[in-house]
Image: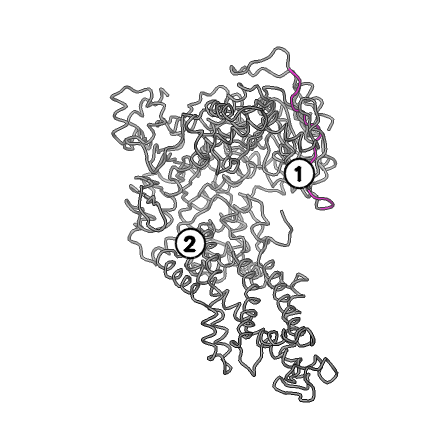
Amino acid sequence: MSVTDEELAEQHEAGDRLGAPSRLRVVAGRFFGSFQGRAGFALLALMFLLAFAGPFLGRWSYTDRDFTAFLAPPSADHWWGTLQTGADVYAVTLRGMRRSLVVGLLAAVVGTTLAAVVGAFAGYFAGWTDRALTWVTDLLLVLPAFLILAVMSPLFASGQWPLFVLVLALFLWMVTSKIVRGVTISLREREFVYAARFMGVRPTTVIFRHILPNMSSLLVVDATLNVSAAILTETSLSYFGFGIQPPDVSLGSLIADGTRTALYAPWTFWFCAGLLVVTVLAVNMVGDSLRDAFDPASGRGRR
Amino acid sequence: MKGYGGLRAESAGRPGTGRADRDDPAEPPGPVLEVTDLHVTFGAGAGAVRAVRGVSYAVRPGEVLGVVGESGSGKSVTSLAVMGLLPPHARVTGSVRLHGREILGADEKTLSAVRGGTISMVFQDPLSALTPVYRVGDQIAEAVRIHRRVSRRDAARRAVELLDLVGIPDAARRARAFPHEFSGGMRQRVMIAMAIANDPDVILCDEPTTALDVTVQAQVLEVLRRARRETGAAIVLITHDLGVVAGSADRVMVMYAGRPVEAGTVDDVYLRPRMPYTAGLLAAVPRLDAAERPVPIEGTPPSPAALPPGCPFEPRCPLAVPACAAAEPALEPVGSPGHLAACIRAEEIEAAGGAPLAARPPGALPAEAGAEAAAGVLPAGAGVPARTGGAFGGRAPEEPGGRAAPPPRRDREVVLAVDDLVRYYPLTKGTLLRRRIGTVRAVDGVSFDVRERETLALVGESGCGKTTTLMEILRLAGPQHGTVTVLGRDTAALGARDRMAIRRDLQVVFQDPMASLDPRMTVYDIVAEPLRTHGIRRPGPRVRELLRLVGLEPGHAARHPQDFSGGQRQRVGIARALALEPRLVVLDEPVSALDVSIRAGVLDLLTDLKARLGLSYLFVAHDLAVVRHLADRVAVMYLGVIAEIGRVERVYAAPLHPYTRALLSAVPVPDPGVERSRGHVLLEGDLPSPADPPSGCRFRTRCPLFRMLGGSERARCVDERPPLRMLGDDHAASCHFAERSGAV
């Protein structure tokens, strides 16, 4: 198979032009090409901006107490009103959202990644790998997650929220990993996986290049649901007084407090609840568009 | 649609095809089913898909109408529309008359009374057409009781009768079995039994044998003939297989892009085609009985959502003139009575005696010359993909020369040697406490070798172990028993590094091009994957070269596999296999998932690449006609063992094993004359389970020769496993009485 140097040079040049866009760029292009993707991303970015830059706009910090206004409705002084303790709702809500966003998103991503990796390895390798990983999965499934989180809550008290995220994620992945394992077992028998194996691609590469991308819609949907699940788990933990410890606040602890006064002082409840809804909505929109972006067959309608 | 009147009027004088099983009435009765100007459209507006565009036909009692077309030609949608089974969003216009009564658009009650009673249907996939949780006998009895007021007992008795009629042995007992206990062919018989349960007047068969093996296909076609004899029903046989139609139908209608493009008696259409598409299709079918290479039709069928304004075949037609693109030609009578063709040049072709296309095969020209002539006939712009060589330079060597060039077989290097390969699978029961209850002998002592620059085909029906053999070779690990030697290296003794090195030289092309290409990757990434895996950093130029080599536009590299047609996808698969310049390519049914008109193009490409790059192929197939055109040597497998092996010409001309003989005779030939005069060796029964193979000779339970033997000779077949005996120059068979197989 010989080619002249000229031809080779020409092909080099042409080949570089030919270099098809990488998968990441294709996905990003498709994601931002859809209105829903752009809107979801913008909304999520707005939430982050609000959570991290918003507090600088207000006059009050989340630790401040205004002893002249207990449970006051929204006014020029307190934009979103105050709580029973005199704390500014705007300040504490944004502080709480900061925690919840980070905890929710991180726990979801970590949880889904763990599920994907464990499930795919168990399904692809079968045999002892499968048995060991399935055993671990089953073990974690039967452990009472809530109780363990409650017992460990003192550890999270002093700004150890990354540990909290990890423990939260550790209890989020098992069911998904079982589904991933099942999907992997069926994908493993597909011809394109055989093709990759027979050309000498290493098993781990096969998993990350062929198996996981082909279940990306499952994973994206799962991650989206996990964001809500993580935020809600954290909320319920905080409701019982575990999880994020005072004086730090989270959306969960705020909603828990707010429910008691929601009827006669709606501002204590609606702002934090509304932000939670908007956040989850934005995450869902992003997830939906991501799923479409990952699937090259979508966007041309049903066949 | 002016022409169909002629079809109805003139086909009344149905030509006697001289078959014995026909009871020709003196006065031809009126048509039982009449379809007139049927249109089916899915969706609306610019994206509307016009799946069927003006189909008209009529069938008389006892007549078999073959409807032939490639996928997407609208042949199945037509039959679903006739049955009123299309989803509500499909817009159906035209007329469907059953015994003169309009049933198109009739209410559900009328249709239910007609369906399964007067008109019934046999579907392609017999597994999904039967309910898995009910007994087979009950399902047939139910079909009877829906349309007739009979007692449960009588219905059950009728079910047994019907099962007996379709040739299910021990029908009374088998009626109590569940569908999963039946083989594919048996299930299709059950479907036919259900279809004829109420003595229908019309049976619509939608690809009734496509999912079946050839020997079983022959059995099922025989059952259909018997069903027609018993019920006197008209049969509409929808299929893509021109051979099936040639042997079974009286008249044939060829469909293309949702329209009939040619119709007439089987003899007229097959021997005197007047529409270039029909002629092209006939030339594109690999034939068992002819050595000519099939000639592909250029291009791909048009998308039903974006049809050209003129004749839909014009872009692919070798005889197209500018007038063809102006308007779509109507189906007009041409030549003999009842023969219709939708081509403005049909008269010219008629006057020339079919000359312009008869220059192409099937005809007098030898293989290569035929292909060259075809290339000359074709429009220059289209080019023959297999020959747009690109960087490899030069044209393909002439085939005869290419064959003669390599040294004799025994002097060439052995690239793959398989010796006494065995693969057993344990059959286990229970999930908690697994216990072994048996052994599936998928491959049971197979030996063959492939030499440099040669193609060995492994053929056999499903379940014969050919794919298992392939996987054992591709695994490159030590087999359970026996040895596999790839390029001189025993696979049992390979280290990781050596295995990787051998993978470079051993590549594979899979059957289903959709399943073997990762749908999430671009074509560029797919073709580049083997290159990157084996450490080539900048695969760009090579990918471009490979795409050109297999006849694809390098500019399409950024697309995903689903943007391509089936044939193009398979070319991507071939490009990927060739990326590392392998020496041995394993082809697992590379063309069986493709349409006939595209199949020949891919076969051409494979032949061409082999000659140009000096490849060796191990080719697994069930289609014996394809094997004939691609392989040098063939190994026929039956139930995990090789029944016969040898040079293709010898095996096909003078098969020694009774199984090879039966297999060859079961393949339908797309030529009505040949098909009628040919004797058929009809095998009885199904493939025995590989978990419990017969003792001695595996084939003896179905062997026609075995039944002709005397007692002591039979004992030898039962007790002694026949070895693969050399019976001629490079021709061996495993039969004790191979010398006498001519008597079958």
The amino acid at mark 1 is Ala
Viewer-nearest residue: B742 or B705:
B705
Quadrant location of residue B24? top right
- In the rendered image of this protein, does residue B140 appear above or below residue A160? above
Q: Secondary structure at mark 2?
A: helix
- In the rendered image of this protein, does residue B500 appear above or below residue A113? above
- In the rendered image of this protein, does residue B478 appear above or below residue A158? above
Viewer-nearest residue: B340 or B149:
B149
Where residue A201 sits in the image (x, y, percent)? Answer: 42, 57
Where residue B37 sits in the image (x, y, percent)? Answer: 71, 30
The amino acid at mark 2 is Arg
Residue at the spot 37% in from the left edge and 21% down from the top edge: B744
Q: Secondary structure at mark 1?
A: strand
Q: Which residue is mark 2?
A: A197
Mark 2 closeness class: few <14, some 14–19, many ≥20 residues within 10 Å: some
Classify residue B341 as left or right of residue A13: right
Viewer-nearest residue: B556 or B143:
B143
Where residue B252 sits in the image (x, y, percent)? Answer: 60, 25
Disc 2 versus disc 1: nearer the observer: 1
Classify residue B251 as left or right of residue B497: right
Any magenta on residue A143?
no
**What is the span of residues highlighted in magenta in the rendered image?**
B29-46
Do labels 2 and 1 touch, CB within 8 Å? no
| Chain under callout 2 | A
Quadrant location of residue B601? top right
Can residue B414 be seen here? Answer: no
Can residue B377 be seen here? Answer: yes
Q: Report the quarter where the N terminus of chain B lies.
A: top right
Residue at the spot 28% in from the left edge and 44% down from the top edge: B482
Q: Which residue is mark 1?
A: B51
